[in-house]
Image (cartoon, grey):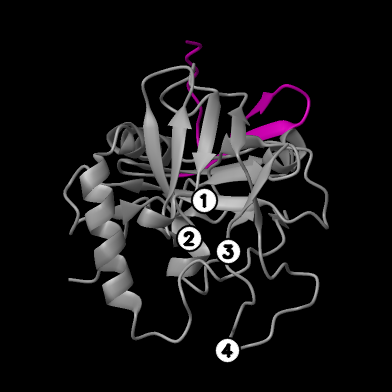
């Protein structure tokens, strides 16, 4: 599978993170959602595009239906974001304890640019090695908003 | 749909290992206790509906809105020391019961 570099390296952070945490993630160019993407059950095959003109956003373009989504890395918006995943979701994606999954939030632009939000409670969980993904509900979904504002008013 | 009536303290068994117990009934609120293996996802119905609705609204975004938002977001965060998209994702956290 061809891969695109996602985050620019090196990463400068205020507090040093453990060495096991990646400094730069590798993005798969295609993602397969076996269960579809709620409420679009037949939307399974997607191209993931990192176009610099719309950075830091990513585009998820469906190959089955006329459908596209805008995604953003939730950690870039909320440093203290700590998503907890259900074991079934981790198993379904064949993620092992040392794997570093890709977590991306779907952006909602339908209420206008100024009102743009990202879904922090039900993000996309992706195994970057296999390109398999799932829209999940976090175990600790109650701590995060389905509509996290991108711009402070 | 199977419909059952239960009283406070009574419970149901779903399959071999999922127990749903009615702990307390207080007006229009019912407090449930659920015992289930870690492999079972337990999610509030309205949250699922909200996520479904939000995903439907997020489909087919207009490209020019996205370019505008990217510009606005860069402007809003340029004063902060950490650039966007440079945070590393943490390890997956498995639900602990």
Give coordinates of residue A128: x percent, y percent: 69, 45
Q: Which residue is mark 3?
A: A7
Of A114 and B68, the residue lying toward us? B68
Q: Chain of mark 2?
A: A
How many angstroms separate mark 1 from mark 4 (CA)?
Answer: 22 Å
* Residue topped by disc 4: A14
Location of mark 2 (residue): A74
Please tell me if label 4 and label 2 are on a single chain.
yes
Marks 2 and 3: which is nearer the front?
3
Q: Which mark is residue A104?
A: 1
Q: Earlier in the sequence, mark 2 or mark 3?
A: 3
Is there one chain holding both mark 1 and mark 2?
yes
Circle 2 SS class:
helix
Q: CA distance from mark 3 to mark 1?
A: 13 Å
Q: Both on one chain, marks 3 and 1?
A: yes
Q: Nearer the viewer, mark 3 or mark 1?
A: 3
Res A85 visible:
no
Q: Of label 3 and label 4, which has the lower sequence position?
A: 3
Q: Position of residue B7 (x, y in %)?
A: 50, 32
Q: Quadrant of the C terminus of chain A?
A: bottom left
- What element does badge 4 sit on? loop
Residue A68 is drawn in which quadrant? top left
Along the horizontal axis of the image, is A127 left or right of B20? right
Could you tell me which quadrant the N terminus of chain A lies in?
top right
Vertical order, A18 against B10 (above or below): below
Does the CB distance between marks 1 and 2 fall below 8 Å? yes
What residue span does the magenta drawing correspond to? Answer: B1-24
For residue A85, above or below residue A55: above
Residues under labels 4 and 2: Cα distance? 18 Å
Label 1: which secondary element: strand
Of pointers 1 and 4, the one earlier in the residue sequence:
4
């Amino acid at each position: 599978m061809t891969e695109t570099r996602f985050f620019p390296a090196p990463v400068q952070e205020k507090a040093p993170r453990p060495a096991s945490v990646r400094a730069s993630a590798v993005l798969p160019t295609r993602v397969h959602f076996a269960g579809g993407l709620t409420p679009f059950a037949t939307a399974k095959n997607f191209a993931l595009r990192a176009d610099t003109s719309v950075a830091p956003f990513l585009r998820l373009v469906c190959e089955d239906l006329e459908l596209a989504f805008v995604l953003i890395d939730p950690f870039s918006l909320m440093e203290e974001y700590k998503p907890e995943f259900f074991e079934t979701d981790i198993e379904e994606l064949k993620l092992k304890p040392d794997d570093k999954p890709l977590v991306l939030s779907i952006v909602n632009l339908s209420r206008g640019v100024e009102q743009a939000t990202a879904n922090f409670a039900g993000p996309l969980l992706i195994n970057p090695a296999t390109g398999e993904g799932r829209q999940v509900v976090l175990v600790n979904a109650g701590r995060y908003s389905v509509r996290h504002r991108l711009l402070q008013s | 749909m199977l419909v059952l009536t239960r009283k406070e303290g009574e419970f149901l068994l779903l399959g071999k290992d999922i127990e749903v117990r009615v702990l307390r009934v207080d007006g229009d609120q019912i407090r449930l206790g659920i015992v289930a293996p870690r492999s079972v996802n337990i999610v509030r119905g309205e949250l699922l509906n909200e996520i479904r609705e939000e995903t439907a609204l997020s489909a087919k975004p207009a490209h020019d809105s996205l370019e505008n938002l990217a510009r606005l977001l860069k402007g809003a965060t340029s004063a902060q020391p950490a650039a966007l998209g440079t945070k590393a994702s943490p390890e997956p956290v498995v639900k602990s019961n």
